[in-house]
Image (spheres, rainbow, N blue to C red):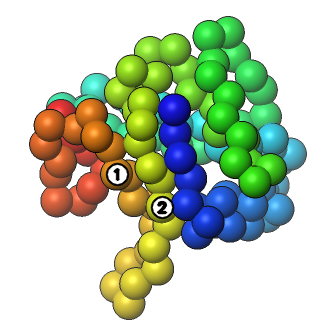
């Protein structure tokens, strides 16, 4: 369903190890909003919720709620480091359009 690159796995493992509260993995959600209609939301997660799909890559768990699963099927998540900014990048084959920030799609 979702693929994580090696860089994304490393970034999530670092975030989990530094978390103030214990967490089991990363939750990726899609919500209405953003400049293109839908936006990605991410956060550390410690609980599996009803309807969640759980994807595990190299020991990192990703939780996706039932409402978001159709929007992220086949998506690859990367983590890039640049001079001006660093962060997660979403390569989503379901996105008909993306905004310039890369965090919103339609």
**The residue tagged with tag 2: helix, strand or loop?**
strand
| 42 displayed left or right of 103 | right
**Residue placed under numbered mark 2 in the picture:** 78
Task: Check the image and report above or below for 92 versus 37.
Answer: below
Q: Position of residue 20 (x, y in %)?
A: 81, 55
Question: CB under 8 Å between callouts 2 and 1?
Answer: yes
User: Which mark, by number, is residue 58?
Assistant: none
Question: What residue is rendered at 28% in x and 40% in y?
Answer: 93
Q: Position of residue 63 (x, y in %)?
A: 63, 31
Question: What residue is rendered at 56% in x and 53% in y?
Answer: 4
Number of on-image labels: 2
**Residue placed under numbered mark 1 in the picture:** 91
Question: Which corner quadrant of the image does residue 14 belong to?
Answer: bottom right
Task: Check the image and report above or below for 44 versus 49.
Answer: below
Q: Position of residue 100 (x, y in %)?
A: 16, 59
Q: Earlier in the sequence, mark 2 or mark 1?
A: 2
The quadrant of the picture occupied by the C terminus is: top left
């Amino acid at each position: 369903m979702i693929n994580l690159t090696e860089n994304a796995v490393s970034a999530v493992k670092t975030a989990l190890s530094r978390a103030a509260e214990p967490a089991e993995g990363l939750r990726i959600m899609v919500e209405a909003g953003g400049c293109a209609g839908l936006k990605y939301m991410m956060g550390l997660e410690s609980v599996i919720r009803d309807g969640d799909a759980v994807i595990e890559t190299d020991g990192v768990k990703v939780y996706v709620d039932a409402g978001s699963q159709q929007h992220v099927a086949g998506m690859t998540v990367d983590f890039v480091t640049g001079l001006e900014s660093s962060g997660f990048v979403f390569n989503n084959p379901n996105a008909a359009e993306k905004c310039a920030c890369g965090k919103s799609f339609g």
